[in-house]
Image: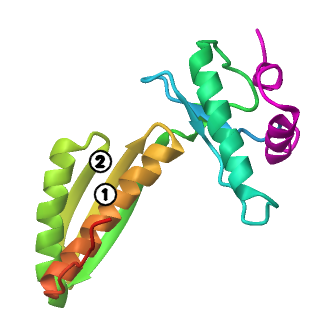
């Protein structure tokens, strides 16, 4: 294996910034970064705890490190501070609706059919039972970020269907 993430960053960051990352990674044992193979960019793989003395400084250090690693063009595969794709897999999420919720089910189904037609990795099965309806959504993901993105998209569609059927408008303001 070539240069490690720790040694690469140590040579390019201030001591204070490097020390923040070393502490956040618990001595470079916790993976702080994930490498997106499609774009070649590195991204943060951890949440900054509110318990940190200076969470903004840790976040700044993480962003700077991602920038430096992305610009390096080096292959850091196998390094402990880079998250692996061991998180890949699939999971089934089941949603049930009573007969009284048929309108929510129908709208959720229509919205899901639009999503599954455009969104790779999301598949849905619909079933009518004597006492209601069931939707099983299968998420196929290659890493935890993709899983969370897909799960959030399905959750948003369910929330949207419930709000529309209840005729509760969405309100927002422009920033």
Disc marking residue 111: none
Labels 2 and 1 touching (C-beta < 8 A): yes
The tag earlier along the polypeptide, 2 or 1, is 2
Q: Quadrant of residue 133?
A: bottom left
Quadrant (top left/top right/bottom left/bottom right) for the C terminus: bottom left
Residue 29 image position (x, y, % from top left) = 83, 38
Residue 12 is drawn in which quadrant? top right
| Residue where numbered disc 1 is placed | 137
The residue depicted at 71 percent of the width and 40 percent of the height is 61
Q: Which residues are magenta?
A: 1-28
Tell which of 10 and 168 is nearer to you: 10
Foreground residue, 86 or 118? 118
Q: In the displayed structure, would residue 85 be above or below residue 172?
A: above
User: In the rendered image, is residue 2 in sight?
Assistant: yes
Q: Quadrant of residue 32?
A: top right
State the residue in front, 37 or 72. 72
- Check disc 2 and report the residue beneath it: 122
- Judging from the image, what secondary structure is the residue with disc 2 in? strand
Residue displayed at 65% across by 54% down: 47
Q: Residue placed at 64% from the left, 13% from the top?
A: 75
Magenta includes 18? yes
Q: In the figure, is residue 109 to the left or right of 61?
A: left
Q: Position of residue 13 (x, y in %)?
A: 78, 28
Q: Is residue 140 above or below residue 91?
A: above
Q: Residue furthest top?
A: 2
Q: Position of residue 6 (x, y in %)?
A: 81, 26
* Quadrant the N terminus occupies: top right
């Amino acid at each position: 294996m070539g240069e490690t993430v720790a040694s690469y960053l140590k040579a390019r960051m201030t001591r204070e910034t490097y020390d923040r990352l070393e502490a956040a990674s618990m001595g470079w044992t916790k993976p702080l970064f994930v490498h997106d193979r499609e774009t070649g960019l590195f991204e943060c793989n951890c949440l900054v705890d509110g318990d940190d003395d200076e969470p903004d400084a840790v976040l700044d250090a993480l962003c700077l490190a991602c920038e430096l690693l992305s610009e390096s063009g080096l292959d850091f595969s196998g390094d402990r501070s880079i998250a692996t794709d061991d998180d890949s897999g699939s999971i089934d999420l089941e949603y049930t609706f009573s007969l009284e919720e048929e309108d929510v089910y129908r709208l959720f189904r229509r919205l899901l059919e639009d999503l599954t037609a455009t969104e790779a990795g999301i598949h849905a099965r619909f079933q009518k039972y004597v006492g209601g309806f069931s939707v099983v959504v299968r998420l196929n993901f290659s890493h935890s970020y993709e899983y969370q993105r897909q799960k959030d998209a399905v959750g948003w569609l369910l929330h949207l269907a419930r709000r529309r059927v209840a005729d509760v408008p969405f309100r927002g303001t422009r920033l």
